[in-house]
Image (cartoon, rainbow, N blue to C red):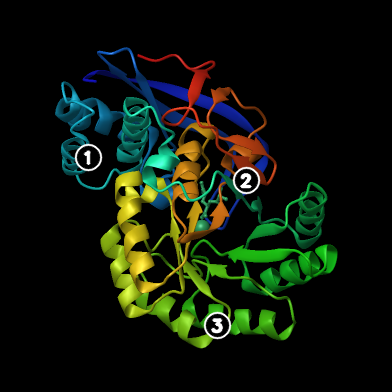
Amino acid sequence: MKITDIQLGHISIPLKKPFKTALRTVNSVEDVVVKIITDTGHIGYGEAPPTGVITGDTTGSIIGAIEEPIKKHLIGLEIESFEEIMLKLQKSLVKNTSAKAAIDIALYDLFGQLYQAPLYKLLGGYRKEIITDITISVNDPEQMAKDSLEAMNLGYKTLKIKVGKDANIDIIRMKAIREAVGYDIDLRIDANQGWKPKEAVYFLRKMEDAGINIEFVEQPVAAYDFEGLKFVTDNISIPVLADESIFSPMDAAKIIQMRAADLINIKLMKTGGIYNALKICALAETYGVECMIGCMLESKISVTAAVHLAAAKSIITKIDLDGPILCSEDPIEGGARFDEYKITLSDEPGLGFKKIQGVVFK
Ligand SMILES: C[C@H](N)C(=O)N[C@H](CCC(=O)O)C(=O)O
Ligand SMILES: [Mg+2]
């Protein structure tokens, strides 16, 4: 199975509601889609979102990275020589993790097809069904309480609450949400780097004292501020999860060795795909640090790859793969099945895609 061509397309899906974090507001998924074609007629699909505020990647940079260095390094290679392909992909240029992730995902899709097995089984086959949280965008407290109740009524047991815009109002937001949903729902919060270390400690302690009961806090401080992250971790009892601070396995090793966070958020768009995500899983497992798997604003193509990884690995104990659920439509036939919070994999080979509607590949 030899790679003969790599084509690109664009997927555009309106969201059900605007997605709002401390970093940005988005109304639709606008992602680059990758199609890798082989001489055997097998096709692998991948996807990359331009999440510039987190990864630095834009639509233009993703397309440029794939059309120039990546494509040149991969055409003509055999999927059988998987390690060689992965090394060439990762070494074709530095950074550009979203472009690498899209290609890595399409290659793993082909890898599964080559051996006629669903990817999650090839990677470990731990389970075939997972349960995701759903994100509540940062808004005024009344709106967030209403959105949380709506999610609870759809059956979600875990809500990921976006905060980090103004710590004084964040406390009011969290009180309003906890009051609305009661204590049977787990609340995890994501500040998306919005607080300073001392401010984070002050307000998180206040939230603890108010009995809000928070499962964990995600990325309270700036991505680069490992010391600040450690300061928060050392000074509150709520577990701290590192998201934007960890892209590479090296970042993960550093955070773990510093004890700067209690938990790690793996996202394929930060790691450059499954190949490096597996290294983070191995590191985390070695040190007994549980992982969450997350996503950006992604459709079912790349999120299906994340579902396969989560289904394969027991160290991934927390799931934030709500990208496709936030979308108002699903133009992808096949892949993971989303029934609100319940995500199930089929036993189709690779990632199991059948058809991607409305995307023109060139
Ligand atoms: C969509 C997912 N639940 C999520 O919240 N991801 C964000 C970043 C998403 C983005 O801005 O595209 C996160 O965990 O920080
Ligand atoms: Mg996050």
- Whether residue 138 appears in this view of the structure is yes
Of marks 2 and 3, which one's residue comes earlier in the chain?
2
Residues 152 and 358: in front is 152
Quarter of the figure with the C terminus: top left
Residues 152 and 193: in front is 152
- Where residue 71 sits, quadrant-wise, is top left
Q: CA distance from mark 2 to mark 3?
A: 26 Å
Q: Position of residue 186 (x, y in %)?
A: 70, 65
Of marks 3 and 1, which one's residue comes earlier in the chain?
1
- Whether residue 273 appears in this view of the structure is no
- Ligand 1 is within 8 Å of the C-beta of the residue at disc 2: yes
Query: Could you tell me if the residues under marks 2 and 3 are in contact, i.e. CB atoms within 8 Å?
Result: no
Determine which residue is flagged by label 2: 19
Question: Which numbered marker is on residue 201?
Answer: 3
User: What kind of residue is marked 1?
Assistant: Met
Q: Is residue 205 above or below residue 8?
A: below
Q: Position of residue 302 (x, y in %)?
A: 46, 36
Circle 2 residues within 10 Å: few <14, some 14–19, many ≥20: some
Residue drawn at (34%, 40%), measured in percent from left and top?
Answer: 101
Circle 1 residues within 10 Å: few <14, some 14–19, many ≥20: many
Residue drawn at (19%, 25%), measured in percent from left and top?
Answer: 78
Question: Which numbered marker is on residue 179?
Answer: none
Which secondary structure lies at badge 2? strand
Residue drawn at (40%, 64%), measured in percent from left and top?
Answer: 223
Determine which residue is flagged by label 1: 86
